[in-house]
Amino acid sequence: MRMIDIIEKKRDNKELTKEEIKFFVNGYTKGEIPDYQMSALLMAIYFNGMTNDETVNLTMSMAHSGDILDLSRINGCKVDKHSTGGVGDKTTLIVAPIAACCGVKIAKMSGRALGFSGGTIDKLESFDGINLRPDVEDFIKQVNDIGIAVIAQTGDLAPADKKIYALRDITGTVANKSLIASSIMSKKIAAGCDKIVLDVKVGSGAFMRTIDEARELAKIMSDIGKGVGREVVCLLTNMDEPLGINVGNILEVKEAMEVLKGIGPSDITEVSIQLAANIVSIGLSIPYDEAIDKVEKTIEDGSAYEKLREMVSREGGETKYFDDLNLFNEAKYKVNILAPKSGYIKSVATNEIGRASMILGAGRETKEDEIDFTAGCQIFKKTSQQVNEGDVLCCIHTNNEEKIKVATDIILNAYDICDELIDKPVLIYDIVR
Ligand code: URA
């Protein structure tokens, strides 16, 4: 078999066989197929898409490119949660401890930032000293002991996805439904959980820009799950503006902790409660309303906040921040961006907010870049809110003075202020079971 023939076949929009898919997945993972050929194939897939059979075959080839975790030694139902990626999306840090408090086992491997969207592992590294690379035995023991572990994805888990994902990130080939579905589901299958709750983001800060596209992505992932005997629930949630106020690693961790204390912004609180209730409902096989009651109680009684502290402590992270959120480091420069005119916020180009945060230091432009954990922005004015000229729209945080001007221009352009009243955005569009 030759890679050039596979590229040409896909370029001509023909269906690839299981063997051909296995050939390029294994060849690329082993370093036998060069980046330039894989990039060409990814672009052909990006434009021509994949059939359902091709998507399932790609998922299974990537899932079996490394180890399949055996979590059978963890007692109880293990439910995994994954987001397709957004801006200001810190829900894992909120939902995972809540679900663990309710009795669902959370044995989760998370990723780093991709493009303009943030990653849970980068956020967790805001706690100095944290070790997100324990060995598998310690990971399993931690979940059995305290009900929760969120760690970095090991190199042996779906290594094909890891390599292909990094290449997609720099070749403009992320936003394709088959590639996203196979990337997510290969990791979930390899990670060995029993059931999966997926947060499929829709809007200007998501890879899926329309509800129809997101619904299609949800259906592809549910079908893959069904095929391998894993129950999948997908929530279609709004990413037309950042979730919550804070974007950037420490800023997001602080906001997640505020939500767990019951004092967080209402949109992120609402989405987190719904995600957690779905996890608890399928994890404990209980009705949804009962799950909602349980979830809300863990915030009211402070147990979810304590569960996050317990997890960070067990993973070696500094926990003084749980006693005082002001102990987190802050950026040297904090600059307010003011509304250029009065009116109502019509929209916020969320991907641009993600890009500005990355430029300020919150994300990586190349794989080698170091993250500035204190960098990011706070989006104080959001869709449908009224503003007067000179009101603070956003505050940017950075240690790099040179980046302030460019980030300010991006954010000012991201805001559309109009004269008409605008409806409040819907937070959750649909739940696909
Ligand atoms: N998240 C993933 O894990 N993979 C993708 O391709 C996109 C978002």
Image (spheres, helix red, strand yellow):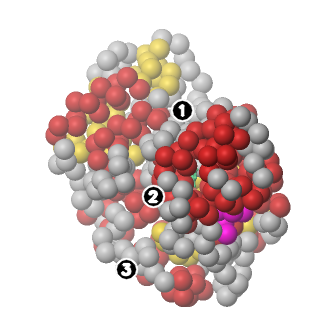
Residue 290, by quadrant, is: bottom right
Q: Is residue 355 above or below residue 110?
A: above
The answer to which of marks 3 and 1 sits earlier in the sequence is 1
Q: Position of residue 56 (x, y in %)?
A: 76, 55
Residue range in magenta is: 60-64
Q: CA distance from mark 3 to mark 1?
A: 37 Å
Query: Is 68 situated above or below 74?
Result: above
CB-based contact (under 8 Å), mark 2 and mark 1: no
Q: Amino acid at mark 3?
A: Gly
Tell whether 73 sits left or right of 362: right
Disc 1 C-beta below 8 A from ligand 1: no
Image quadrant assignment for residue 45: top right
- Label 2, on which residue? 112
In percent of width and height, residue 196 lies at: 70, 62
Residue placed furthest toward the top: 419
Circle nearer the N terminus (2, 3): 2
- The residue located at (30%, 70%) in the rendering is 128
The Cα–Cα distance between marks 2 and 1, rounded to whole angstroms, is 20 Å
> Percent from the top left, x then y, of residue 182?
67, 54
Q: Can see residue 72?
A: yes
Q: Secondary structure at mark 1?
A: loop
Q: Quadrant of residue 204?
A: top right
